Amino acid sequence: VQLVESGGGLVQAGGSLRLSCAASGFTFDDYAVGWIRQAPGKEREGVACITFTDFSGSSTYYLDSVKGRFTISSDDAKSTVYLEMNSLKPEDTATYSCAAVLIRGLGIGAQTSMRLFLDDFGSWGQGTLVTVSS
């Protein structure tokens, strides 16, 4: 399992960015894929998660502070998960990492899957830096 993030950069407040998480070595079936961010000196936050299982279908989870601004989606043909970020705020500044974990048979959805990521389960990418200037 390999994950490579891209799309980070510097943007002014109110602007938009789209992050990509390209996966190789596995397909999304029976996996959860999430975006987690960490700002300097702060705890990690689970930003968004999407699942691909018969149990949960394509369920999603969002951190309260990004609901209505961020959207997680996937392109199965490209084995890529995206995080569309709109109306960016300076407090969104962080390194954003994507992670994937196999959830087959666990009977869990996106919110619980995010807890697995925050407990360091799964495979992780290297991260991409997002800086939002005021």
Image: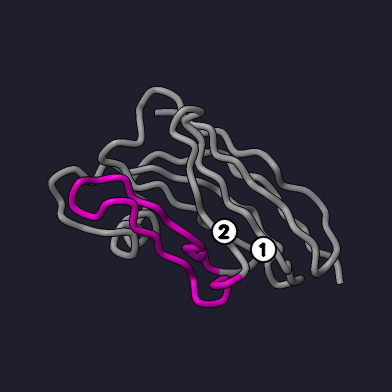
Magenta residues? Answer: 43-68
Residue at x 24% of width, y 55% of height: 56
Q: Quadrant of the C terminus?
A: bottom right
Contact (Cβ within 8 Å) of mark 2 with mark 1:
no
Residue 70 x/y as whole percent: 59, 63
- Establish if 1 lies above or below 83: above
Of residue 26 and residue 96, the one placed in the foreground of this image is 26
Q: As rendered, which of 45 and 64 lies closer to the eye? A: 64
Is residue 112 rendered to the left or right of residue 25?
A: left
Q: Is 68 displayed left or right of 99 in the figure?
A: right
Please tell me which residue is depicted at 73% across the width and 69% down the height of the picture. 87
In the figure, 13 relative to 97: above or below?
A: below
Circle 1 SS class: loop
Instruction: List the residue tagged with mark 1.
Output: 40
* Tag shown at residue 22: none
Q: Amino acid at mark 1?
A: Pro
Write the residue at 56% across / 33% down: 4
Residue 124: image location, x then y, percent: 46, 41
User: Three-letter amino acid code at disc 2?
Assistant: Arg
Q: Which element is circle 2 on?
A: strand
Q: Nearer the viewer, mark 2 or mark 1?
A: 2
Q: Judge whether residue 126 is colored magenta.
A: no
- Badge 2 crowding class, 10 Å Cα cut-off, few under 14, some 14 to 19, many 20 or more, is many
28 lies left or right of 71: left
**Mark 2–mark 1 distance (CA, rounded to whole Å):** 10 Å
In the picture provided, is 98 more to the left or to the right than 132?
left
Q: Which residue does the numbered mark 2 point to in the structure image?
A: 37
